[in-house]
Image (cartoon, rainbow, N blue to C red):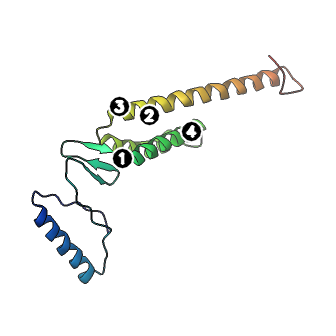
Amino acid sequence: MDDMVIWGDDKDKLLAQSRDIQNFLREKLLLDLKEICHNKTSVGVPFLGYRIMNDRLRLLPNSKRRYARKMKEYKAMYDSGLWSEPVYMSHVMPATSFVQKADSAGFLRNTLTKINYELRITNYENQQSLHAQTICTNSKCVSNNSKF
């Protein structure tokens, strides 16, 4: 069964609703619920990769790590030429849309800046290596280990 959240002001009423839902699902649909979690909204509720607070939406730590890892992988696929720009964007847009729904502007900016910076260094080193190999080939060097 999909995840669900029930909000309310009356704890006893929420407990009764939880029991009714659990009984209905077990008896009528032959489904079992995961562990039921009761919490105050001031603490927030972890739900679908977010922590839902009464006045804001935050990303859970796992969601942040997953996003950063995926963006780095996607950028590497694009930079290597394995992905075209439309393919790259078809991966980046949904992931970024998920992150943008939360209060995450600082995280998003920092993550993308860091990834672009790391990849710029990697690309620069790869270009220097390719440039050195090209010079060596054009000069008809015998060894790729030539010092320039």
Q: Is residue 82 left or right of residue 145?
A: left
Labels 2 & 4 near each other (Cβ < 8 A): no
Dot 3 or dot 1: first in sequence order is: 1
Q: Along the polypeptide, which appears first: circle 2 or circle 1?
A: 1
Q: Identify the residue under disc 4.
A: 76
For label 2, the residue is 111
Q: Circle 1 is placed at which residue position?
A: 60
Disc 4 is placed on an element classified as helix
Return the x and y of residue 46 as percentages of the image width and height.
Answer: 30, 53
> Would residue 84 be seen by someone viewing this image from the given angle?
no
Q: Looking at numbered disc 4 in the image, what kind of residue is underneath it?
A: Ala
Give the amino acid type for the residue marked by disc 2 in the picture.
Thr
Earlier along the polypeptide chain: callout 2 or callout 3?
3
Mark 3–mark 1 Cα distance, whole angstroms, equals 15 Å
Residue 89 occupies quadrant: top left
Q: How far across and down, in percent of the image, does residue 94 sit?
A: 38, 46
Q: Quadrant of the C terminus?
A: top right
Task: Say which element carries label 2.
Answer: helix
Q: Are marks 3 and 1 in contact (CB under 8 Å)?
A: no
Q: CA distance from mark 2 to mark 3?
A: 8 Å
Dot 1 amino acid type: Leu
> Of the residues tagged 2 and 1, which is closer to the observer?
1
Kindly state the secondary structure of the residue where label 3 is placed.
helix
> Mark 2 near mark 3, Cβ–Cβ under 8 Å?
no
Q: Do tag 2 and tag 1 residues touch (Cβ < 8 Å)?
A: no
Report helix, strand or loop for mark 1: loop
Q: Residue furthest top?
A: 148
Residue denoted by label 3 = 106
Other-residue count near label 1 (Cα within 10 Å), few / some / many at <14 / 14–19 / ≥20: some
Q: CA distance from mark 3 to mark 4?
A: 23 Å
Q: Categorize mark 4 by other alpha carbons within 10 Å: few (<14), some (14-19), many (20+).
A: some
User: Dot 3, crowdedness within 10 Å: few (<14), some or many (≥20)?
Assistant: few
